[in-house]
Amino acid sequence: MSDNTKIDFIYLSEQDMIKAGVTDMPTCVDTMEEMFALLYKGDYRMAGANNDSHGAMVTFPEKTDIPNMPHHTPDRRLMAMPAYLGGDYQTCGVKWYGSNIANRERGLPRSILMMTLNDVDTGAPLAHMSANLLSAYRTGAVPGVGARHLARKDSKVIGLLGPGVMGKTSVAAFMAVCPQIDTLKVKGRGQKSLDDFLTWVNVTFPQITNVQVVDTLEEVVQDSDIVTYCNSGETGDVSTYPIVKREWVKTGAYISMPAYCRLDAGLEQDDVRKVLDNPGLYDAWYEEAPKPSHMYIPIIGCRFLDMVEEGLMNKDSLEDLGAIAAGAAPGRNNEEEIIILSVGGLPTEDVAWATKIYRNAVENNIGVKLNLWDTPELR
């Protein structure tokens, strides 16, 4: 038994994270694929009774008589997202998530995120790191894993709603796995975000030679090989969620949905394949949320579980991206099928990418070493 009780860990600022490779999207896509294979094997744990919970969230009331208590505004939440990941990772960690859409009025991101990575045996901290880029890239990489297995190999056209951070990282992931893409259609709300996005595309992906700003959802979807909605908004009234209609969808399209949306009856039919990033996550959400769950959690996979409850589909027809990534289930079967991927976001993704970045940082002496203690006062 060792008498060495000293614990050091490293702090990684956003610039440190960049130096350590957090914006390397091709490697992030590969990392997410490894993670999904571990999920399929069951070599992971998340929070909650079924070990599949998204996390624990603090929300605020619409009205309160208590002085100084925050009140509900769009995207205002404080949330902890813990997980353990096995395989070659063997780490655990938690992403702490503070979000308020009013941050944008202060020149801040809507969400401000931190990640703590821990030794799975002792629980000692390994790293405390800036997590906005970590979270953004792992979120975008998951649609990229989906595209690798579910999009047509000859995909050339992306249709994107929402030119924000999630839109950028999704496009970066699609470009990492579908090298023939040369056309991008984008719909946004504000000119500033559109201009920023268009500049980013021009600089980052000069091979996208045809970029079109469109005004309608139909134009986003029509003739697109890959369709993705990456916008945000208020939950509750499903009729206000942006729709995808079957008549707009190209034969053979891959539809990646990491944000709120709804489908018309045609796309809810049995011949459209429906894939979940992690079935257990949706089961956990369904247990936790009031019904119908899609009102409260606007991710399309929650609508799929509502459909199961309503007898509109068989739960066995929902597919698992983990099984596909692990080679235990088929990816795209033919050039004609339409495939929808619901992307809910998993704490295991944060742990996977954080572990890779942490190891890069240690190997390259990046970050600031901090001391927790040499000998603990209490033990």
Image (cartoon, helix red, strand yellow):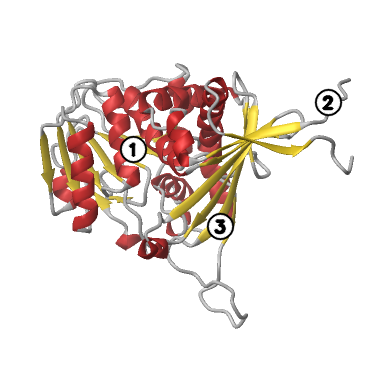
Q: Which of marks 3 and 2 is nearer the N terminus?
A: 2
Q: Callout 1 environment at 10 Å: few (<14), some (14 to 19), or many (20+)? A: many
Give coordinates of residue 61: x percent, y percent.
Answer: 55, 72
Secondary element type, mark 1 = helix
The answer to whether 306 is drawn above or below residue 173 in the figure is below
- Callout 3, which amino acid? Leu
The residue beneath circle 2 is 4
Separation of residues labelled 3 and 2 (CA atoms): 36 Å
| Residue designated by label 3 | 78
Closer to the eye: label 1 or 2: 2
Q: Is the residue 344 above or below the residue 60 in the image?
A: above
Name which residue type carries label 2: Asn
Q: Which mark is residue 30?
A: none
Q: Please provide percent x and percent y for residue 300.
A: 39, 47
Q: Nearer the viewer, residue 179 or 366?
A: 366
Is 347 situated left or right of 277 in this image?
right
As drawn, the label of residue 169 is 1
Question: In percent of the image, x 18 and y 50: which residue is there?
Answer: 195
Quarter of the image that includes the N terminus: top right
Q: What element carries label 2?
A: loop
Cα separation, mark 1 vs mark 3, equals: 23 Å
Q: Is residue 25 rendered to the left or right of residue 346?
A: left
Residue at disc 3, secondary structure? strand
In the rendered structure, which amino acid carries the disc numbered 1? Answer: Thr
Q: Are marks 1 and 2 in contact (CB under 8 Å)?
A: no
Q: How crowded is mark 3: few (under 14 residues within 10 Å), some or many (20 or more)?
A: some
- Residue 216 appears left or right of 175: left
Residue 355 x %, y %: 56, 28
Residue 55, percent across and down?
59, 47
